[in-house]
Image (spheres, rainbow, N blue to C red):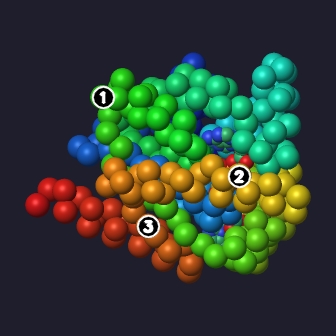
Amino acid sequence: MNGHPSRDGWYTAGELDCFPVPPPRERPSRLVLLGAPGAGKGTQARLLCESLRACHLSTGDLFRAARDQCASSPAMRAAIEAMNRGELVPEELVIRMVRERASCLRCQGGFVLDGFPRNQRQAYALDEILADLNVALEAVVYLELPLEEIIARLSGRRTCVECRAVFHVSSNPPSRSDICDYCDGRLEQRTDDQPDAIRVRMQVFDAETLALVEFYERLGKLVRISARGTPEQIRDRVLQALDRNVSEITT
Ligand code: AP5
């Protein structure tokens, strides 16, 4: 526990309730974060969720949790192998997992979806799920960062095996080497942060995910944000852009 909701509902597909249960909001934030691997989606999801009191829903975290618990179904094993190579996990599995967690998408606290959708088919699936829930997406935030900075961010990243908090060896080091500041968990380098897997992930982003920028731009949902600067500067940029969006819609 680190001051954020436990996300039990997300990890257990609704079998457990989150703690604490998010209080209702008059206007819950419902956002998607889009960006290349290492652009800072997880970092911003965490900061934005603190500001907006929404819940961070990451599909990557779901697969890493399944791997850490030695998930034994053949479908999940194949998914984890694909993830370790830097490839997308099979479409049907991801969409099914998000569908099974639809209750998180209509949570009264709102959400920041990180890592889904990742291609056109997933974007259509998300549209369908949200339409079934009668829930509207507020915006899709696209974090833009040049390749050299992406490589530096990924190669120095360390992640907590317990609470999934993200650190960086130079730009955001933990206070004690390899120990999480929030839960004392062990920090590790992700398997897919090795050079070969990073190369594959960047290719997959260019081939599959980048097209969603135009897709959401056409729908009037896209908010482009420069992901340069400190995490707090980027968060403030996002919050200001979202505020501007709301006032454009309501005036
Ligand atoms: P996922 O976990 O979603 O990985 P990703 O998209 O590759 O993104 P990352 O988590 O690598 O980076 P990030 O943008 O979150 O950056 P972070 O904040 O950590 O997915 C992993 C895998 O799961 C996929 O490859 C795929 O196999 C599978 N998968 C997941 N969803 C799927 C889907 N929908 N369909 C199919 N397969 C799916 O930051 C990176 C580093 O930079 C950190 O060390 C951080 O501390 C540092 N940093 C962040 N911001 C700053 C800053 N402003 N200044 C300096 N350093 C910073």
**Quarter of the image with the C terminus in it:** bottom left
- Quadrant in which residue 237 is drawn: bottom left
Instruction: Specify the label residue 134 is tagged with.
Output: 1
Q: Which of marks 1 and 2 is nearer the N terminus?
A: 1
- Residue 93 seen in the figure: yes
Residue at coordinates 55% horizontally, 69% vertically from top-left?
144
Mark 3: amino acid: Arg
Foreground pick, 220 / 9: 220
Q: Nearer the viewer, residue 215 or 13?
A: 215
Mark 1, secondary structure of its residue: loop
Left or right of 83: which side holds 19? left
Q: Give me the C-alpha separation between circle 1 and circle 3.
A: 26 Å
Q: Where is residue 3 in the image (x, y as percent from the top left)?
A: 53, 50
**For residue 224, which numbered disc appears in the image?**
3
Q: Which of marks 2 and 3 is in front?
A: 2
Q: Residue 229 carries which label?
A: none
Residue shown at 49% from the left, 61% from the top: 142
Q: Position of residue 168 (x, y in %)?
A: 74, 69
Above-or-below relation of 15 to 108:
above
Q: Name the residue under label 2.
A: 204
Give the residue displayed 49% in from the left and 40% down from the top: 123
- Residue extending furthest toward the bottom: 229
Q: Could you tell me residue 42's position as x and y percent?
A: 60, 56
As drawn, 148 above or below 189: below
* Mark 1 CB lies closer than 8 A to ligand 1: no
Question: How dense is the environment of label 3, judged by Cα within 10 Å: few (below 14), some, or many (20 and up)?
Answer: some
**Of tags 1 and 3, which is closer to the observer?**
3
Instruction: Tell me the element at label 2.
Output: helix
> Looking at the image, do the residues carrying marks 1 and 2 touch, with CB atoms under 8 Å apart?
no
Residue 172, visible in the rendered structure: no
